[in-house]
């Protein structure tokens, strides 16, 4: 990744460098180059790093290698490895007749959920930083969808959306908004909409709290200065709040894109009655390839998993690139 | 400040990306068939059973008690792991990939496992008296390439359930004997209004092959005849055309293509649906709720000839592992004693798989409808490994016929079957 240079800031002046604290063997001290105070023998450093390295190797790297290995194997329906498949599994995934549908669904799902979540969260965060009686309880209430298990939330929505007994249809019918019930989960024109609603619902809490923190970090004096200079509330929001919220917006967007892209329970649970891949995203597609579809092929599913990792890395990489580019041009 | 924040994002991204890779990491690989535990060939004293959960109340209780008896009588230890039906396919597949196959696995398919050479056949682990006691139908469908691998644990047979109250309100005197009558009755029930559903037709992915099997067997059709796939035969196309007609006439529940069996059962249990294809566990639920006044009848055939029943059995298959043969044989010897197998079947509300079991249950009035048909029940071609994939294709594609062409749907399934899945 092109941004990898920013991971280790190197000798460039970073926060805290050059002040008195850096003379102490603190966290900042470890960043010094050889010969400076705080330097330790490489073996000692390795000892300190060992637990983290073991964790990364065991929990991240080893399964990733196994995944890659599985993607290159030929598997029987029972899960038995019959031999090596070379790149066949990758070719089969790319040749899959429903791949286009699945990719389109993924784009719609991620873009819709993240965009709606960000916009709604900006508004709700504005509201939640104002002080009003009972604010604490409202903030707690906002966390609840986050605290609940995704599968439970999804099942709950399946009941709410139900054609025969669902409360949503019941309310809409009683209010005479509609004449016949809406098949939220079975009607192709409604399914994605219904899923997006749930996706937004569970993404809101995290995003709101990121934005609340972001709003809290905006210095009051800047706002006061703008007010004194006669800026209207809208101007203040557009020219001060939003630009200063950029780090929060960036973090919220990147993490939400990854989170929503990887969201399995919602898409799977709300979609389990629908045959084929009409409303599947790449994640549920991967699962169905392994266990539910006529392919029932672990190797193909592993190849799809590799594609998923690459896809999300590329998408987020492009996003960060765009952000950087804007920053550079605005300087 | 900007650069540190960015580095946090980048680091977080890197971790998330790697974690994503890790999520798929359960798919490790093992090339050797079966298991390699105890490669010295020593006799295994402990064997593992992975059992499917038929019910929360009874399954675990039965197997725990069974394990105790097994230990007391044979000295071997049985480790029991009960897994829900939703997960068992995934779990068993993962176990085999990782070279950790159980000794005995309870599943609804076996032929693919037999094809992969993972299983013991009856000569190795099933006592001869037990084999003779198992109903001929189940021996037939449990036999792959001349050897009996699929030992049935229990069975079920489908029957026609109807709501007597709704039939009375609609002025219908007797359950239908032909499909024409069924269609007319469904129209009458739907005409009662209030959201009543004539016939609850579940063609969703959960068990589309079960619903369709019942219909096609009663139109003289089949999945496979004389070793050839006949999924798109004229009779089967006519059967699916008829189901589409029922859906188009709106005498079924809304959107049959997207209705799972459990949802169809719910409609019947709530008294909304007039007719449904059910089996003994549904009857048990209905008896417990006491909400619906129902009766069970043979499923009508298209032309009024004798009704055929769709039977289902699940399997207890034995994995070849060095040294486990004796312990596995002792397991089957004990499981198929009338005390054990019939206790299990009775608790779970299913049907027997042995001749002695049929005799044992013969005085149960509620089961008469099923028991009479059981020895002649038709099963799906579970003895063909291809069926394991065709079944999945049927589940994922059959519903598509409700909004498209039944002929094209069945042609597609036929192609899948002929190409070996």
Image: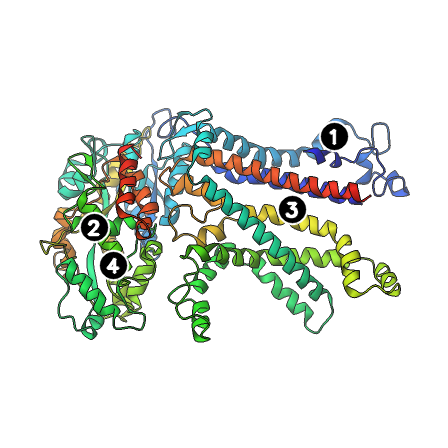
- Give the label, 3 or 1, closer to the camera: 3
- Name the residue that disc number 3 marks: A254
Label 3 or label 1, whichever comes before in sequence order:
1
| Residue A198 located left or right of residue A236 | left
Q: How is the image coloured?
A: rainbow
- Name the residue that disc number 1 marks: A44
Asked where in the image residue B245 lies, by quadrant, the reply is bottom left
Near mark 1 (Cα within 10 A), the count class, few <14, some 14-19 or many ≥20, is few
Q: CA–CA distance between discs 4 and 3?
A: 49 Å
Name the residue at 47% across, 33% down: A94
Which mark identifies residue B239? 2
- Viewer-nearest residue: A166 or B330: A166
Q: Mark 3 lies on which chain?
A: A
| Quadrant in the picture for the C terminus of chain A | top right
Label 2 or label 4, whichever comes before in sequence order:
2
Q: CA–CA distance between discs 2 and 4?
A: 11 Å
Q: Is residue B182 above or below residue B203?
A: below
């Amino acid at each position: 990744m092109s941004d990898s240079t920013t991971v280790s800031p190197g000798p460039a002046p970073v926060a805290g460098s050059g002040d008195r604290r850096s003379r102490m063997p603190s966290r900042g001290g470890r960043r010094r180059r050889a010969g400076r105070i705080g330097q330790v023998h490489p073996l000692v450093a390795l000892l300190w790093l060992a637990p983290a390295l073991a964790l990364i190797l065991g929990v991240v790297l080893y399964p990733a290698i196994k995944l890659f290995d599985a993607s290159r194997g030929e598997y029987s329906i029972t899960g038995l490895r019959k031999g090596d498949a070379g790149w066949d599994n990758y070719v089969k995934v790319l040749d899959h007749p429903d791949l286009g549908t699945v990719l389109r669904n993924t784009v719609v799902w991620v873009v819709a959920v993240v965009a709606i979540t960000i916009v709604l969260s900006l508004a709700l965060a504005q509201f939640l930083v104002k002080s009003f009686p009972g604010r604490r309880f409202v903030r707690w209430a906002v966390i609840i969808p986050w605290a609940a298990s995704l599968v439970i939330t999804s099942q709950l929505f399946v009941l709410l959306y139900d054609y025969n007994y669902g409360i949503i249809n019941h309310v809409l019918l009683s209010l005479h908004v509609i004449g016949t019930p809406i098949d939220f989960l079975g009607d192709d024109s409604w399914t994605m909409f219904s899923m997006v609603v749930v996706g937004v619902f569970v993404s809101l809490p995290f995003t709101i709290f990121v934005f609340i923190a972001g709003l809290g970090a905006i210095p009051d004096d800047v706002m006061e200065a703008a007010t004194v200079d006669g800026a209207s509330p809208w101007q203040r929001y557009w020219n001060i709040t939003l630009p200063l919220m950029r780090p929060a917006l960036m973090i919220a967007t990147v993490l939400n894109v990854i989170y929503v892209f990887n969201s399995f329970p919602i898409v799977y649970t709300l979609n389990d009655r629908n045959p084929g891949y009409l409303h599947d995203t790449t994640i549920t597609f991967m699962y169905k390839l392994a266990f539910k579809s006529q392919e029932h092929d672990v190797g193909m599913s592993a190849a799809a998993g590799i594609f998923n990792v690459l896809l999300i890395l590329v998408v987020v990489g492009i996003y960060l690139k765009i952000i950087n580019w804007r920053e550079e041009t605005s300087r | 400040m900007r650069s540190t924040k960015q580095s946090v994002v980048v680091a977080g991204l890197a971790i998330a990306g790697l974690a994503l890779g890790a999520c798929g990491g359960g798919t490790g690989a093992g090339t050797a068939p079966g298991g390699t535990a105890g490669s010295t060939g020593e006799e295994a004293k402990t064997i593992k059973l992975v059992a499917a959960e038929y019910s929360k109340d009874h399954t675990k209780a039965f197997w725990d008690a069974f394990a105790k008896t097994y230990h007391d009588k044979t000295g071997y230890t049985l480790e029991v792991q009960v897994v829900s039906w939703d997960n068992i396919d995934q779990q068993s597949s993962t176990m085999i990939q990782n070279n950790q196959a159980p000794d005995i696995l309870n599943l609804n398919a076996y032929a693919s496992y037999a094809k992969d050479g993972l299983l013991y056949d009856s000569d190795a682990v099933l006592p001869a008296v037990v084999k003779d006691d198992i109903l001929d139908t189940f021996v037939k469908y449990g036999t792959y390439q001349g050897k009996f691998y699929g030992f049935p644990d229990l069975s079920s047979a489908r029957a026609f359930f109807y709501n007597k109250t709704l039939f009375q309100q609609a002025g219908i005197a007797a359950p239908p004997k032909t499909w024409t009558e069924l269609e007319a009755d469904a129209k009458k029930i739907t005409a009662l209004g209030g959201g009543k559903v004539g016939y609850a037709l579940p063609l969703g992915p959960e068990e589309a092959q079960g619903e369709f099997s019942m219909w096609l067997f009663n139109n003289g059709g089949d999945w496979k005849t004389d070793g050839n796939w006949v999924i798109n035969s004229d009779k089967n196309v006519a059967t699916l055309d008829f189901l589409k007609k029922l859906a188009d006439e709106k005498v079924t529940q809304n959107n049959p293509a997207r209705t799972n069996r459990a949802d169809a059962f719910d409609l019947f249990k709530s008294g909304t649906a007039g007719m449904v294809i059910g089996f003994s566990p549904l009857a048990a639920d209905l008896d417990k709720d006491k909400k619906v006044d129902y009766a069970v009848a043979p499923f009508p055939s298209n032309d009024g000839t004798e009704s055929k029943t769709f039977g289902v059995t699940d399997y207890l298959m034995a994995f070849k592992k060095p040294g486990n043969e004796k312990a596995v044989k002792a397991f089957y010897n004990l499981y198929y004693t009338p005390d054990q197998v019939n206790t299990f079947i009775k608790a779970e509300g299913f049907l027997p798989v042995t001749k002695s079991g049929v005799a044992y249950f013969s005085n149960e009035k509620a089961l008469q409808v099923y028991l009479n048909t059981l020895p002649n029940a038709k099963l799906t071609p579970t003895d063909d490994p291809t069926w394991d994939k065709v079944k999945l294709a049927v589940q994922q594609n059959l519903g598509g016929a409700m909004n498209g062409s039944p002929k094209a749907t069945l042609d597609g399934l036929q192609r899948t079957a002929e190409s070996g899945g």
